[in-house]
Image (spheres, grey):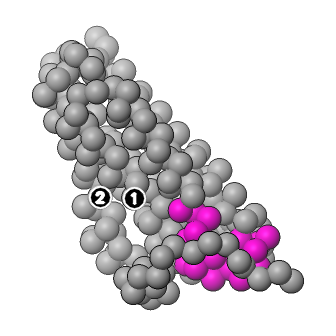
Amino acid sequence: MAQQHTPHLPHYEGWDLFTHGHLPVMQLFLYLTLPLSVIPPVMIYYAGLAYGGVTLPALNESQLQIICTVLFMAELAMTFVVAYVIQNLGEVIEIRPDYADAYKLAVLVPIPLWVAPLFLFVPNFILNLTVGAFALLLSGRLIFYAVPQILRVKVKRHATLLSGAILAAGLVAWSAMMYITLVTWSWVTSGMLLL
């Protein structure tokens, strides 16, 4: 069987420690997921207050707080759901990854998507749309780099098959999270919520 010969990320001791080390799920949650998940809601809140009505629809503080809280909770919950899905997708290539490794992958891959909202400091819709699209592409590419290392898949076609399945599941999860956020947005801006 063909061995994995995809290009690798530059060799960094931290990358090797992260991909090959055993990190408990709770440690990953507290030190990586929680702080990174704060960035998008805080930046949306900032952008809504700073230039709401210009580039974004005008919302009051209460509405922004509800939307940002729902987004934050959805982000946290989605990492656990995606890790569960990744663990079960391993069966596609007849492996059963450890939940901690699946969670590690579920937290590593969306890092560009978590960091991209920092560009909301700049009130430019086209810039933010471009950065968001680039972050989505980078996250997709990161899946193909990380799957062989974190889930220890040695056969190239198995790694490619599993990476593609995880990419599809990740896009569904990201879309579901955006849907939840947009439904909340619609709900708080409609007459159903009297503030």
Element marked by disc 1:
helix
Would you identify the image quadrant in which residue 124 lies? Answer: top left
Report the front residue among 106 and 134. Answer: 134
Which residue ends up furthest to the right in the rendered image? 1
Q: Earlier in the sequence, mark 2 or mark 1?
A: 2
Crowd around label 1: few <14 · some 14–19 · many ≥20 (10 Å):
some
Left or right: 74 in relation to 51? right
- Which residue is at 25% across, 37% downward? 120
Whether 155 is among the magenta residues is: yes
Q: Which quarter shows the N terminus?
A: bottom right
Which of the two marks, 2 or 1, is nearer to us in this view?
1
Left or right: 169 in relation to 154? left
Q: Is residue 150 above or below residue 57?
A: below
Report the front residue among 149 and 75. Answer: 149
Are circles 2 and 1 on residues that touch, CB within 8 Å? Answer: yes
Q: Which residue is mark 2?
A: 36
Left or right: 116 in relation to 51? right
Q: Which residues are magenta?
A: 142-159
Which residue ends up furthest to the top in the rendered image? 191
- Which residue is at 16% across, 36% downward? 46
Question: Magenta region's main secondary structure?
Answer: helix
Q: Which residue is mark 1?
A: 111
Element marked by disc 2:
helix
